[in-house]
Image (cartoon, rainbow, N blue to C red):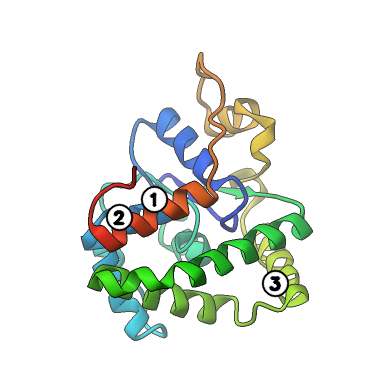
Amino acid sequence: MKVIGAGMGRTGTLSLKTALERLLGEPCYHMETIIRRPDQLDAWYAWSRDPQAEPDWDAILPGFAAGVDAPLCLFWETLHRRYPEAKVVLTLRDPEKWCDSFTTLMRTNIRGAWMGLFSSRARRMGAFGRTLGKHFMGSLDRQHLIDTFNAHNQRVRDTVPADRLLEFRVQEGWGPLCAFLDQPIPDAPFPRLNEGMELIRKGQWELAFGRKGR
């Protein structure tokens, strides 16, 4: 793995995924990978049955040059030890706005849980998501979430060598990211993708019915 995205989800990770794939010419892991690939859901569901164990990285990581968003961002430290030469990108966002976005996502997932009645895939995705949230976030109390977000970011700053870490806001565009990865700036706008409700809606549809949402 060449690039580890340590920034929490809801910090522009879908835009970063697309940008990294453009720069590296190879796939980048993201939560949508689990929604779209049954083998990935199988691996993470197995982890959810025993969250104290290590995920099966040999089943999860092959074929990916980078990884961003949950769940990989929550295992950034493990991945950093596994790939010490990888560069780390910490996507940032105002903590209050991040918390608003994160809790909206959680409420939407809860309202969409009825779709689990339609397929075992959706039920397994729900079990994995609940385990992931409980294991890493604990409570949805607002101050707790903000404190967890800030502590996560500070841990990254304190751990990753400065020459291998980029603190990045997607609003900054190609410049800092390309300089960090020693890549030329593409002749195209930096991707500005909505990782919010549309992705959630499409993901729920695919899990429930096994095909892409319209």
**Residue count near mark 1 (Cα–Cα under 10 Å), binned few <14, some 14–19, many ≥20:** some
* Image vertical order of residue 24 relative to residue 42, above or below: above
Tell me the kind of residue under disc 3.
Leu
Sequence-first tag of 1 and 3: 3
**Residue count near mark 2 (Cα–Cα under 10 Å), binned few <14, some 14–19, many ≥20:** some
What residue would you read off at disc 3? 145
Tell me the kind of residue under disc 1.
Lys
Q: 25 or 35, which is in the foreground?
A: 35
Q: Assess whether mark 2 and mark 1 are in contact (beta carbons under 8 angstroms).
A: yes
Name the residue rendered at 78%, 59% in the picture: 96
Tell me the kind of residue under disc 2.
Glu
Name the residue rendered at 45%, 61% in the picture: 72
What residue would you read off at disc 1? 202
What residue would you read off at disc 2? 206
Left or right: 157 with respect to 72?
right
* x then y, percent, for residue 103: 64, 66
Q: Nearer the viewer, mark 3 or mark 2?
A: 2
Left or right: 97 with respect to 190?
right
Sequence-first tag of 3 and 2: 3
Q: CA distance from mark 1 to mark 3?
A: 26 Å
Q: 193 or 118, which is in the foreground?
A: 118
Q: CA distance from mark 3 to mark 2?
A: 29 Å
